[in-house]
Amino acid sequence: MTEAIAVSGLRKSYGKTVALDGLDMSVAQGEVHGFLGPNGSGKTTTIRILLGLLRADGGSARLLGDDPWRAATALHRRLAYVPGDVTLWPNFTGGEVIDLLGRLRGGIDARRRASLLERFDLDPTKKARSYSKGNRQKVALISALASDVELLILDEPTAGLDPLMEATFRDCIEQERHSGRTVLLSSHILSEVEALCERVTIIRAGRAVESGTLADMRHLTRTSISADLAGRPVGLDRLPGVHDLDLQDVSGAGRLAARMRCEVDTDKLDAVLRHLTDAGVLSLVSQPPTLEELFLRHYAADGPGPAAAAAAGDQHEVPA
Amino acid sequence: MTSLAGARDLTKLAARRDRIMLVAWIYVLTILVVSTGYSFKGLYKTPASREALASGIGHNAAALALAGPLYNDSLGALAVYKAGSATALAAGLMSIFIVIRHTRADEEAGRLELVGSTAVGRHAAMAVGALLAVAANVVLALLIFAGMAFIGLPAGGSAAAGLAIGTCGIFFAAVAAVAAQLSGSARGARGIAICVLAASYLIMSVGAAAGSGGLRWLLWLSPVGWANEVRAYAGDRWPVLVLPVAAAVAVAGLAGVLAARRDLGAGLVPPRPGPPEAARSLRSPLALAWRLQRAGLAGWAGATFLYGAALGSLARHIGSMLGSSKHVGNVLTELGGQSALTDAYLATMMSVFGLVAAGYAISVVLRLRSEEAAQQAEAVLAGSVSRPAWAGSQLVIAVAGSALMLTAAGLGTGLTFGLSGGDAGTQVPRLLGAALAQLPASLAVAGVAAILFGLLPRACVAGGWAALALATVVLLLGPTLRLAQWFQDISPFTHVPRLPGVSGSTVPLAWLALIALALAAAGLAGLRRRDIG
């Protein structure tokens, strides 16, 4: 069994509201998988179906090779879950909740618990009612990370954490990766996903709009290039995949004859670079697309898919 | 008055949020009083029939303990006797819910923080809660006045009845405002205020059961007793109304002082650090349920023990209170049991304990729903815990807890009753048995909440309490209002043999137990199939 999570054509509606509309997703065993999407896109619904809390209306979901609805109790021994909005019993201490939740999923490693308490700087003797959001989040995280499980399902786990604790969280997830645990990480913090996840699934309006490795996805986007050139390139604006070209002639600066900036569809990069080297490159700065750009395109409510976006870009292009 | 800035806008918001709840409360309470007056008017047309009823009640300590004192045999006084104390209590409960909802509950949920960051004074939320509660009680008083006058009762008495109930409600709004300062959680604050309400009722009922005898002065220690002592339709003692109003102002002042001394989100009792690790035993859903319910159960069981002890100590006086009226025997038999008057009194008390146990069991079952809504259920069910194990744990606590409460009630009643007659050895087991005989009926009522939780979770809170309300109406009002037998048969308590005293068949008990079991099983089966959250 190499797939920890396999979801295909998953559907779920609440009355007339469609939460999931044929979602496909696959998470390999041992990978840290990013799960991204705007608010209300169906991430939490997906996770709750995977936890057997909700019953899907259609499609299939397999978790660790089993049916998450029917085998929920057995499966939950093998996973730990951190909800996005952690509510605790107000008169329990943090330490009690950590132990209780750990024991309910089948056991907790006392040594790891102690070291996590220290790393996350949490006072386990405080009553849950006096914890801040971040501290409640830590309670759930420590309990999950200290449990001996194969799979971690984390729903926006760092939403309330300070930057220092977020760094600690990243270290912990790195360790989990090395020890071979599978992690499904739903998050809005793109730098976190970029740093931790090998593959991501982007979901919008209940469907996966993008899925794959970050490297693959970058190919679908544009690289921005700026260069100092020894000669004036001809016909650059006519090359396919070149956008927002800004070409300026420079005189009286030694060999420097022109400066250019543009955005290039990443898969057309090669042709554009050849064109530039023909003109003579003095210096070149290229910036890969950030995950941010990737998401902004997908998150926008009526944002077009990659192909449509490229077409739209062509129309706006103004020849230099 | 900057500390009250923004109160007007907040009141509009609050009134909007509560419009359905407020209308429902006021409607039900008005109907409770007016319909009692109306049906008494039809049932007891002749002065003779009223005199018989009044003399029967006057000599029935159980009836007096439950409903409060009766001052004369006029139609209005009888109706107020029957429904007045219950309505005054319910008005208090309404005030508690309104005030806590707009103060501590909002504060706990963080909504008050959001609102407080706008141009809103720090006492504004409390003022809003209080204002809304006062307004609700004033409307209630007006409607009771109008309704009772409309069905032809004297206007003066109707006004006194409405105001007695309304001012009692207002007093408890002030109590709730103090409770909201003391406890850091809405649940805790509600608990404190309801304890005060329950204590007021207990004190009133001991005072009322004393008839015109020794402990009658206790009425003056209870806000519910104040409402009785207004004596609507029986003298209309207006000056007594000053008592609840003055007390409410004083208590509200205390709430203001307390509020000024604490921070947002904090209670006055500072939270103490607790254990850094969970106890070894805290490792199953049952252990969790026990941990969540044990403090509440201890309180309920202690209260029923004390109430039982208080009522048991009165039982010996029943015979001596009996006058020469020939109606008395008939009425008492109708109200109580078939053999000794004392046993009839005790049997009625046991039914009431059965209702209380049912209320406890319902509150435990509904905890499942509130855990689900607050997503604590999600955390537990994401562990290796099956749904039946999670929900079943609370059901086990509901069964064991109500059994424990009935045991406490039987022990308390049996001990004081037995000791006062020197036969504790026979009375304790006898009353223990009588109390525990209520258990199947209590659980059958709570079963309604359980099945709804599994099949129609949105309706389970309203449905669960409605089932209890129905059983209460049938038990307490059914015979007096001569409700149709088929209707009375709906309530499980109708089928419980009237113990102690009658050696009734235990077959109905087995049936009731079976029904309770079936309801719980259906609820669990429904829970397995439905979505959580």
Image: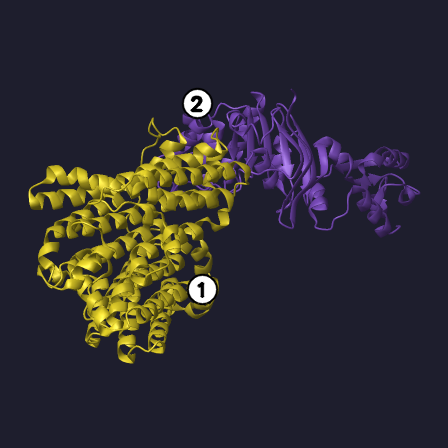
Chain colours: A purple, B yellow
* Residue drawn at x 24%, y 60% as measured from the top left: B67
> Alpha-carbon neighbours of circle 2 within 10 Å: few (<14), some, or many (≥20)?
some
A240 relative position to A168: left or right = right
Q: Position of residue A44 (x, y in %)?
A: 59, 41
Q: Which residue is mark 1?
A: B14
**Dot 1: element:** helix
Between B346 and B42, the residue placed more toward the observer is B42
The three-letter code of the residue at mark 1 reads: Ala
Badge 1 crowding class, 10 Å Cα cut-off, few under 14, some 14 to 19, many 20 or more, is: some
Residue of label 2: A109
* Nearer the observer, B84 or A121: B84
Element carrying mark 2: loop
Q: Nearer the viewer, mark 2 or mark 1?
A: 1
Return the residue found at the far bottom: B155
Toward which corner of the image does residue B73 lie, by quadrant?
bottom left
The x, y position of residue B40, in whole percent, is 30, 68
What residue is rendered at 58% in x and 24% in y?
A: A177
Task: Provide residue A14's location: percent of width, then percent of height.
Answer: 61, 47
